[in-house]
Image: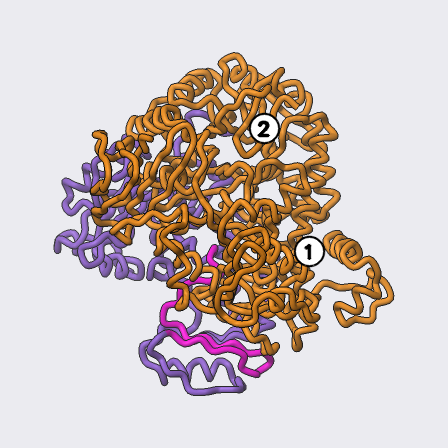
Amino acid sequence: MAIRVDSNGLYLDGRRIPLYSGSMHYWRHPPDIWLALLEHIKELGFEIIQTPVPWGVHESGPGIFDFGEKHPQKNLPQFLDLCMKNGILVILRPGPFVDEDMPFGGFPLRVIRNSAVWALTSTGAPALSTRYGFPFVIPSYASEKFLQEIGKFLDALMPILAPRQYPNGPVILCQMNRESAYMGRTQPYDLDYSAESITLYRNFLSEKYGSIENLNTMHGTKHSSFLEVQPPKGCEAVVQRDLPGYLDWAEYKEYLIRHFYQRLGQLFRDRGISIPLSVDGPSIFSTPMDTMELQKSQDLPLVGMEVDPNPSDYHGLARQIRYLTGTNKLPFVSRFGSGNSWFSPRVNTPHEAEFAIMSAVMHGMTAVNFHMLVEGDRWLGAPISRTGAFREEYADLFRRLHDFFTKYGVWESKKNCRTLVLLSFELERYHQAVSTLNGAYLGLIRIPSVFSEVSLSLGFQTDPARQSIHEEGSWILEACRFLENVQVEYNLADTHQVLDELAKYDMVFLPTADFMNIREQEKFLEFADRGGHLVFGPGLPTLDGAMNPALALKGAIQEPGTQTHGVGKITYLPSFDAAKDLITADMPNVVLLDNPNLRLTIRGGSSILVFLVNPTGASQKSMMISSWPLRGVWNAPEETQTGSVTTEIAPFTVQVWEVLK
Amino acid sequence: MIVRDVEIVDLRPGVWRNLISLLDFSRLADVRPTHPNILSVLHHGGKVLRVYAPAGFRVPAMEQVDDPQELAKKLYYQLPGLESVQILEQDSLMLFSDRVQRIDWMTSDMEDFTINAFRLVEQDPAGLSFFPPFSWKWNGFPIEDARTWLVSGPDPCAYFLGVVRDAAPWLTLILRVAGKKVRLITTIDYLARFEIPVEGLPSSPKDLATVCEAIHDHIAPIRAALICDYMVFAKLLTSEEKRRDLTLAVADGLASSFGILE
């Protein structure tokens, strides 16, 4: 393959290029200004653009497609050829779902009005989405009819796309779909109860358990075949041994997403697409979106993340990027908001946009697509207006960013990070499985969130439902806050992380309750055995996922505290009250500042850059201690300073200092 | 599909009639909304499962719901300061969710769909009891009154609406009315953020003229505008003498307007 994606970036014929792109929508502009828009994009420093190909725009009648034969703005081949001629590479998003404020999310109404493609709720109603400005039924990931219809669209598209793949054409990446987790309806008992989904659920169980006898043992049922198995429609667990049936349904929701992308990817491959495929992942952590499993099992080198930057939520943005960095080979924000929808209550100012972008870079973003570079109708605040004029205050920001990223080799550098915090898939599945009252439309009545919880008394020492990252006071959130407060930069990932990747970190924080898959327990012990420091809590697992005894961790440590294990260490930490001595001054990623309101990270590459952020609304002063001279290269004084550097940093601002070794 | 000369104001009416921002989008999108002073009781077949009381309200212990409507009324008067009491039967919630999703979506735009969904609540499906009776509010105003008022001016028409409360902007919208339908175009925030040097709400007829001129030049041909106090707007919605009341408010310095109710 002429194109390769790995942790160092995007390689075209062995030449590394930054995956640094921005969106424009060809069909929203007349062809006579396409060239001017592309030239403006290049002037801002971009050599790659991203554009969706909305199915509903090009399908002008049942099975009839217009790629410019009738309507010049739909002339995709002309647009791609223009890109090629002008040295612009293209990330193409053929959907099937594109959103982009299109009616029905870009689906043709003909397709989604067919009940054979619908995802169904547990009451058999079509699962209706009102998330995208126009009501339509969410298509089922299990629907063969849906896949057939997608295939027809791709059949029409491929004569245009296939010959325009790199190196013969400009298309370097094919991004599938958008919003890869049930269009936000992730409550497990909400959907999908269509007949095809239930069949797939039975297949999933069959693959997992091998025989109906094994399933009966695990679920406490007496089925004579998998055909008799029905999915749960709510959590009615009474004892611990009831849980596997509900946890399996939560796990199936992950399986269903993988199934869809496996089938979708195959549709592309069968039609001659040889360039890398990617997925535009939603901005959620953990189940039902299993980012790492998706990458491993589906030949997807990139599972991007969407970031809708809100400068007042710096900590949320930082955690998103930390998760992206901890779970992806190449941390790619596939949709970094640049501007906003016309009906959104706010658009970031250039200063706010700069703050968000630089905050993302400092926490590990290494590849990005800005959405949008060119405004269309229904989008405001991009650096280029829909008529082709620069919005100078935004354009100037992008010019400065490009110069900075290029001069200091930011996209070739990596964040220094030796600490990892893990989400537990088992605990997140549990949190999902013990929820009830699927959320669809109950917000209209303003239902209290506690009504969505199932009260269970299953006799656990540690309540697993309280240990989700979504629960205030959970151990994992306390771990994040602890590290932030002691100014130790960390990445986030989940328990599906493989041992070799874990071993790249010095310290791993792992949330635990009473149960944990035995193989996972062994994996984390092996991490410590190899020299890592495993910190877990608040519970001491004694059971596996089937609620049978599993004592690997307990065999290694019985009481709270720290002890050696192999050449590493294990700390059993029920509470962060006892974490005072966990971080020692000799740890390589510890940088002490005298202002606790500031955060600091370091990216290393051809340059070593120190990023310092003030996420507060007030100006802050701080002293940095460095063994090498420092020179400000972004929002900081340019003169070289040595030893202790005192700096003042404006509200909501990122400073960058170059380390002069 | 989307032609070049389509401006924000000209979003295709057939596919983009949109009242969603008027409806407070978060109430639709957020499955775990914040809770004003609403006391909620969840029961299943009469057996109380959960009680949620806003901070500061001490709710008497209860295990059984026999007459939901009567209980809602009793709690409402027993606990002064509550916005409302809602007694919700668990299966009925699922039924409600089910019924919302069976609304005809193919021929509904978002406005129609959302209104129909709220009407389902107002019709009080069995098992969902509210006291006072469920009333759908838009920014504190009765929605039906607001819609009636918003479409009562020239049609088609784009106009600017600003409502002030305690000297602060309460509501700032540029609206378009066509065929007795209301569509939000944008908010004044965009004006403040982009080319037009307008910060906050104008306070005088001269300022109003400046804003309208700016909107006219950059977003939409404005035919009407109103800036007024919150209480004036609330009264206008239900007044039977809208023109007279508006005239009086202008005379009292509580409103600036042109092109409204002509």
Query: Seen in the image, is B218 located left or right of residue B40?
Result: left
Query: Seen in the image, is A618 located left or right of residue A599?
Result: left
- CA–CA distance between discs 2 and 1? 29 Å
Where is residue B2 shown, x and y percent of the image? Answer: 49, 29
Residue A405: give its label: none
Residue at mark 2: chain: A
What amino acid type is highlighted by mark number 1? Tyr
Q: What element carries label 1?
A: helix
**Residue of label 1:** A252
- Which of the 4 image quarters holds residue B89? bottom right
Q: Which residue lies furthest to the right in this view?
A: A224
Question: Which chain is the one coloured orange?
Answer: A
Instruction: Report the span colored magenta.
Output: B28-54
Res A53 seen here = no
Q: Which residue lies furthest to the left in this view?
A: B252
**Residue of label 2:** A173
Q: In the image, is residue A572 part of the stretch drawn in magenta?
A: no
Q: Residue furthest top?
A: A85
Q: Earlier in the sequence, mark 2 or mark 1?
A: 2
Q: Residues within 10 Å of mark 2 (few under 14, many from 20)?
A: many
- Which of the 4 image quarters holds residue A157? top right
Residue under the point 69% across and 33% down: A62
Where is residue A637 shown, x and y percent of the image? Answer: 21, 33
Query: Decide: marks 2, 1 in contact (CB < 8 A)?
Result: no
